[in-house]
Each structure stands twice: as C-alpha cells, then as structure tokens.
Image: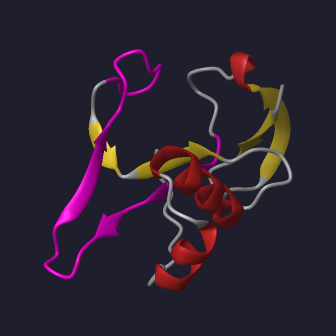
Amino acid sequence: MCEIPIVKNNDEIIKYKKRSEILENDIYRVSSLWITNSSGEVLLAKRAKIKKNHPGVWGPAVSGTVEKDETYYENILKETNEEIGLDVDFVKENISELKKDFVN
C-alpha cells in the first residue's frame, strides 16, 4: 500500500501514513487539473457519493492524492491519464499555468 505525505500548513512533510490511517485533521497533498476550452467553458467532474471527503460535489476535471516520492506535477499527469485517458505528452504540451494553492 502506498504512503501519503502528511504536511504542515507550509507544505513541509512531517511524516508518512498509509491512506487508511489518514485522520480528518491531517493535511496531505492533492493535485487538481482544471480544464477549459477556448470559449472559457470548464470541464467539471462530480465526486463519487462514496468518497470520504466532499462526496457528490462538483469539482476539477481531474484530482488525486500525491504519494510518497511523487511531485504534484507527476501526480497530475498520472491521474489525468487514469481518470480521463489523456496522454501525458498531450497534457505536458497544453498546461498553460502551474499554481500551488493551500486550502484549509
């Protein structure tokens, strides 16, 4: 089973936990990809109702939990291929902005 970095508010890793051990107050890394077309329309995805956090909520087209030894960028490329089938090279060529936000 993969390990998930648990971080401080400033994104500094403090320890690793198995996904099943993550507590409600733990802060962990998540990557998200917002996809827009030339008309400014946004592709959204609805989270499954069985999700632990925010079930049934509309959000970014792709998102995923960053695992140990994985960067945000590596994670979003992997998740994009897994979730919507877009090839890594296509995503790399078409990402217009990379931004890090902290959400509490």
Q: Residue 100 location, x and y as percent? A: 53, 68
Q: Residue 38 location, x and y as percent? A: 20, 82
Place residue 27 in its image quadrant: top right
Numbered range of the magenta stretch: 28-55
Along the line of sight, the residue nearer the viewer: 19 or 102:
19
Along the line of sight, the residue nearer the viewer: 57 or 17:
57
Along the line of sight, the residue nearer the viewer: 22 or 50:
50
Place residue 88 in its image quadrant: bottom right
Q: Point out the image quarter for the N terminus.
A: top right
Name the residue rendered at 34%, 66% in the picture: 35
Q: Residue 82 location, x and y as percent? A: 57, 46
Name the residue rendered at 80%, 49% in the picture: 13
Q: Is 20 located above or below residue 97 in the figure?
A: above
| Residue 10 left/right relative to 90 | right
Along the line of sight, the residue nearer the viewer: 34 or 54:
34
| Residue 87 left/right relative to 4 | left
Q: Is residue 92 magenta?
A: no
Q: Is 64 located above or below residue 40 in the figure?
A: above
Name the residue rendered at 70%, 62% in the picture: 74
Name the residue rendered at 35%, 23% in the picture: 55
Q: Is 30 located above or below residue 6 in the figure?
A: below
Prevailing secondary structure of the magenta residues: loop
Q: Is residue 52 magenta?
A: yes
Task: Look at the image and name its color scheme.
Answer: secondary structure
